[in-house]
Amino acid sequence: MTPIQKLILGLNEEPLVEIASNCKVHHAIINDLNKLVMAAKKDAIDLTIASPFRSFERQQLIWNNKARGLRPIKDADNNVVDTTLLSDEQLLDYILHWSALPGASRHHWGTDMDVYAPSMLSQSLQLEPWEYQTGGPMEQLGDWLDDNLTSYGFFRPYSTFNNGVAIEPWHISHIEQSKPLLEQLNIELIEQVITENDIGLKNSVLAKLESIFNQYIINVGHP
Ligand SMILES: [Zn+2]
């Protein structure tokens, strides 16, 4: 595997820089990220990273906790699902609506992150779409991102629902740096990393990998 392939899969932290405690991003986006944060600050918005880079190992833990019933599974309306009667395929669809397959999270790249504005919160952040929509605590941030993101080289890959991953108004991505990584992500690469690691529902994942790839991994918005 090349260093870029390892980066794509969350297995290479060499291109990343720790810009705050537990907060790593790709070195090539730092300049644009600083400009974005400063521009928000000028408009009295404390744009802050809630979730930056995530390693393969971290995503594997999130995934396995859900796949093995250690964390609740939620439906698209955020209600907890009774999983006892579900097939593995149905369970996979519920998990993939909210959580990326390890090796296929854009958070592996250091080019993508979830953002919020702490000063706008009156209770803890849930990272649910209503918080960023009209009437929600993050509405002003959501509107500001709509108006300004692309001017600073960022976009939202999950701004609309297209029968794949849930809408994530908080998830932003660096256009120029993320594009070549998405282009180099392919089924064989994911198949390799899933096969070689301990992944819950592994056999079902591998059996359905082509449709998972098309429905949940490359099915994203473009700038
Ligand atoms: Zn995200």
Image: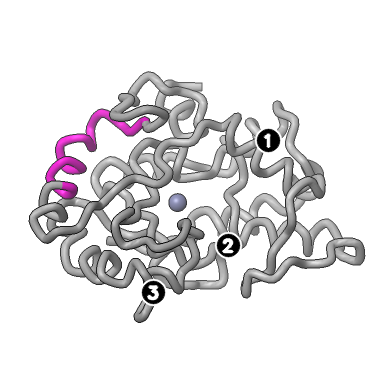
Most extreme residue toward the bottom is 134
Q: Which residues are magenta?
A: 24-37
Task: Kindly state the secondary structure of the residue where label 1 is placed.
Answer: helix
Q: Residues within 10 Å of mark 2 (few under 14, many from 20)?
A: some
**Mark 2 to mark 3: distance in Å?**
29 Å
> Relative to 160, is 126 above or below?
above
Question: Any magenta on residue 103?
Answer: no
Which residue position is annotated with label 2?
Answer: 215
Q: Amino acid at mark 2?
A: Gln
Disc number lying in front (1 or 3)? 3
The mark total stands at 3
> Which residue is painted at 73% across and 37% down in the image?
199
- Secondary structure at numbered mark 2: helix
According to the picture, the residue beneath numbered tag 1 turns out to be 194
| Nearer the observer, 63 or 177 | 63
Residue kind at label 3, given as amino acid type? Gly
Q: Are marks 2 and 1 in contact (CB under 8 Å)?
A: no
Find out whether the residues at labels 1 and 3 contact each other: C-beta distance under 8 Å.
no
Q: Position of residue 192 (x, y in %)?
A: 64, 31
- Badge 3 local density, few (<14 within 10 Å), some, or many (20+)? some
The residue that label 3 is drawn on is 136
Q: As shown in the figure, which amino acid type bears the numbered disc 1?
A: Ile
Label located before the other in sequence (2 or 3) = 3
